[in-house]
Amino acid sequence: MTKKLLAAIITTAVCVTGMLSSCGSNTDGGTVGNNNIAEKVTPTFMYFVSNSDSDFDKTNAMIAELETEYSDEVKFELINVDEDAEAAENFQLVQGNTPALIMLNTDNDISALEFKCTDKDKLENDIKKALQ
């Protein structure tokens, strides 16, 4: 892995965590007495695709199957970087690396980061890990 790609991955991880850090938080700071309470959130499956992906239709069908199976436990976001300019700008790391997954767990931390991944079993394992 090149230093440039590694730096981009770290930057994206920091940005995603920062952007989503307020999800599920209490407005009172989440404290009771002197103890901080970490509120659990619904895991988020953010899957980035591009119209130029070689198996675009097959990939979308696979994500729909996963969403059907896990929709009660996981929030799914399918993001087409060709059609969503804001997502393309905010998640520059995925440009040219689609399909890509950013999986956020119940603590709203990144639990998986996958590039060029269309392996349903691997993605399902990432979901299960995020639910732990």
Image: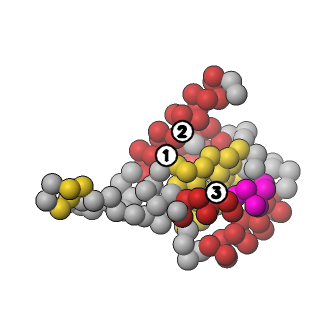
Task: Based on the picture, tell me whether residue 119 belongs to the magenta stretch.
Answer: yes
Compared to residue 69, the image places residue 9 above or below, namely above
According to the picture, the residue beneath numbered tag 2 turns out to be 12
- Dot 3: within a 10 Å radius of its alpha carbon, few (fewer than 14), some, or many (20 or more) residues? many
Residue 87, percent from left and from top: 57, 48
- Dot 2: within a 10 Å radius of its alpha carbon, few (fewer than 14), some, or many (20 or more) residues? some
Question: Under tag 2, what secondary structure?
Answer: helix
According to the picture, the residue beneath numbered tag 1 turns out to be 16
Query: Which disc number belongs to residue 126?
Result: 3
Q: Main secondary structure of the magenta part?
A: helix
Residue 35, percent from left and from top: 20, 56
- Dot 1: within a 10 Å radius of its alpha carbon, few (fewer than 14), some, or many (20 or more) residues? some
In the image, the segment drawn in magenta is 118-123
Residue 70, percent from left and from top: 62, 73
Kind of residue at disc 2: Thr
Question: Under tag 1, what secondary structure?
Answer: helix
Viewed as shown, does residue 16 lie left or right of 103? Answer: left
